[in-house]
Amino acid sequence: MLNIVLFGPPGAGKGTQSERLIEKYGLVHLSTGDIFRANIKGETALGTLAKSYMDQGQLVPDSVTIDMLRSEVVKHESPRGFIFDGFPRTNAQAEALDTFLNELGTGISVMLALEVEESELKTRLLKRAEVSGRADDANPEVIQNRINVYNQETAPVKSFYQAQNKFISINGIGSIDEITNRLFQAIDSI
Ligand code: AMP
């Protein structure tokens, strides 16, 4: 199986690039942010809980997020692989992911990390707010919180995959096609 962690700060282009990767490699796309938003829309108990964190730009607690992701992974029978988009965001999530992929007899093939500097992220998120309708994209304070949480809690997850020799850094600045090609090249090199 080809199991990819598509990593990067908010606004790095994970969602956009995931669409290109699932098309080319026939993978299942699992975005924890999308799953939470679907639960908010469906007014589930999970959605209500997640919303209270998302509106502040905070992470939803690990236990909740990990259980949700595990139940999504096991829904798919003999997939070619997964793209994990927005997960793992903490070392505890990365460890849990390794454990349950291991139980399924597979593992992470690579982490592809989209690198984009902070000023560009803020510009992109405010622009995305015009079309996404996402409250967490429209508020500069919430954006700053999300970036701070990324720097403090999520960026360290890179080391987890570096230690396993599975880390590839990708320049996330350029046209969408240029970045897609960088990702394709990285995947085809593994
Ligand atoms: P995203 O769509 O990836 O930008 O995620 C939007 C929001 O959902 C984040 O700011 C978090 O509040 C929450 N979220 C998404 N994925 C995770 C995760 N893996 N762990 C904790 N919270 C998450």
Image: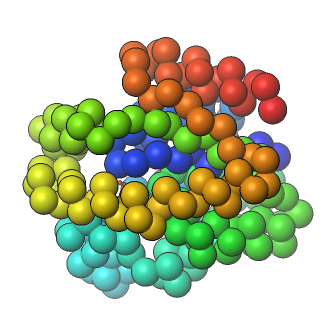
- On the image, which quarter does residue 113 sit in? top right
Residue 176 can be seen in this image? yes
- Tell how many labels: 0
Residue at the image point whose x is 47% and y is 61% from the top: 154
Query: On the image, which quarter does residue 161 sit in?
Result: bottom right
Asked whether, in this view, residue 135 is left or right of residue 109, the answer is left
Which residue is nearer to you in this view: 95 or 78?
95
Residue at 40% over, 58% down:
151
Q: Quadrant of the C terminus?
A: top right
Residue at 34% x, 37% y: name it.
117
- Residue 131 placement (x, y as % from top left): 17, 38
Image-based side of 158 in relation to 17, left or right: right
Name the residue located 79 percent from the left edge and 54 percent from the top edge: 164
The answer to whether 184 appears left or right of 62 in the picture is right
Rendering coords of residue 159 (x, y %): 64, 57
* Residue 131 shows up from this direction: no
x, y percent for residue 129? 16, 43
Near-viewer residue (186 or 73)? 186
- Front position in the image: 16 or 122: 122
Q: Quadrant of ligand 1?
A: bottom left
Say if 79 sits above or below 105 in the image.
above
Classify residue 53 by image quadrant: bottom left
> Going by the image, does 123 lie left or right of 9?
left
**Image x and y of residue 6, in percent:** 56, 45
